[in-house]
Amino acid sequence: MNVLQAHTRAVLALLDADNASPPLVVCNGQVLADVVPPYVLVYFALRTPTGLEVPEMVSLEQTSDVIVTTAYCHSVGYDTPDAALGVAGRVRSQLRGVIPVISGRTCFPIVHSAGPPTSRDEKSQRPVFDQIDTYEFTSLPG
């Protein structure tokens, strides 16, 4: 496992640790054919900011090894917007403010950085609602 995979797996492990009922189904980048709502679908973006972006963390003379991990969490539920918000609330309780543990890295707390309005999939026969929330954390070597 490389350092980028370690970052995504840390977030997925936090989501998998939810022990409420019914179990939170966590999908990494794809929803398998047998999965039905409620579930959370997670996409990741990882970037390495430069010293110009985060001068307090990276010297302008050094190559950056700062990693900013962004998790786009699609909380999906049937029939009402509240169903999607119920999943989103569980995701929030598992991620917001938590400091991920990644070997060889110093991590900062996960923050909720965006959350547009809940939307409905107009193509589906049964109403399906989606709440997209964005969570981020930063890590440094060490």
Image (spheres, rainbow, N blue to C red):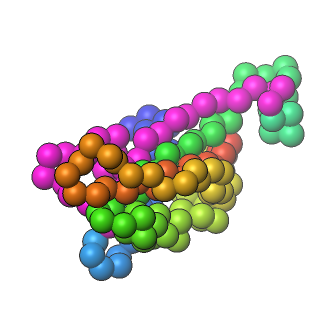
- 48 within the magenta span: yes
Q: Judge from the rendering whether residue 105 lies leftward or rightward of residue 80; answer left or right.
A: right
Residue 31 location, quadrant: top left
Q: Magenta stretch: give its range.
A: 24-53
Outermost residue, bottom side: 21
- Residue at coordinates 65% horizontally, 45% vertically from top-left? 139
Relative depth, front residue between 80 and 26: 80
Relative depth, front residue between 111 and 13: 111
Q: Quadrant of the N terminus?
A: top left
Give how far across and how far down residue 83 sits, in percent. 37, 68
Relative depth, front residue between 137 and 35: 35
- 6 within the magenta span: no
- Can the viewer see residue 103? no
Relative depth, front residue between 57 and 93: 93
Give how far across and how far down residue 7 sits, in percent. 50, 45
Q: Judge from the rendering whether residue 104 lies leftward or rightward of residue 75; answer left or right.
A: right
- Can the viewer see residue 42? yes
- Residue at coordinates 19% horizontally, 46% vertically from top-left? 32
Q: Judge from the rendering whether residue 40 lies leftward or rightward of residue 88; answer left or right.
A: left
Give how far across and how far down residue 112 sits, in percent. 63, 56
- Residue at coordinates 35% horizontally, 76% vertically from top-left? 19
